[in-house]
Image (tube, helix red, strand yellow):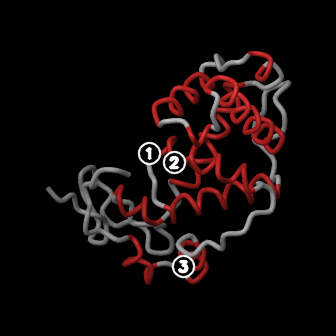
Amino acid sequence: MTQIGHYPSFDVMDEQDAWDDHTQSIVTSRLNSEITFHFLTEPETKLLRRICSILVNDQRADVLDYILVHIDQTLHQSPGESQRKVGVPHASELVRSGLGAIEQGARLTYDAAYTELDTQEQIQYLQSISASMAEPQHIWSPIPQKELFKKLMNLTLESYCSHPNVWSEIGYAGPAYPRGYVRTEIGQLDPWEAKPQR
């Protein structure tokens, strides 16, 4: 994030004593991710890091490391997909071929690697993929562009929004189990929940 949020002094990790041991271990591990990759190659990791950074408008290395590890594990373990349109490849195949097409397309369109483009060109190329309008066509014809963009966005956001630093920024006080909520009326906050600071 590039702006200070509404909860600059709130830290969700101050609430960890209210979580059970299992929850504590899961959440804490997200702050200390082991940076190992089993699916993504080094060039794919570099490219995907830049794409994820643009998708969430965040350049923090620790947050991006966590996102990349999550995506790598998801694609490596292949846990399955809840829904997939007919003709759309499995996530691992879609992402791998899609990253290759992004790199090849950037080189043919801009005569430079995607990570070497200026930020506006990078954004524009991602926007063209989201609208299924990326060029050159012969590179993209076998790849469903819109589905690729959705997959990259979903994988990025599901990990980004589960990082404790992001929880703190949006004022989320972490898992309610086993503590639960006491004040459930609209506009009421429990004592441990974040209070907006002006």
Instruction: Tell whether 133 sits left or right of 18.
Output: right
Few, some or many residues within 10 Å of mark 1 (<14, 14–19, 20+): few
Instruction: Tell whether 156 sits left or right of 144.
Output: left
| Label 2–label 1 contact, CB within 8 A | yes
Question: Gap between marks 2 and 3, in whole Å?
Answer: 27 Å
Q: Residue at x 54, y 76 (%)?
A: 28
Image label count:
3
Reading the image, the residue beneath label 3 is: 24
**Percent coordinates x, y for residue 193 in the rendering:** 31, 66
Give the residue type that dot 1 points to: Asn
Q: Residue at x 43, y 64 (%)?
A: 165
Q: Residue at x 18, y 59 (%)?
A: 197
For label 2, the SS is: helix
Viewport quadrant of the C terminus = bottom left
Nearest to N terminus: mark 3 or mark 1: 3
Q: Identify the disc placed on residue 57.
A: 1
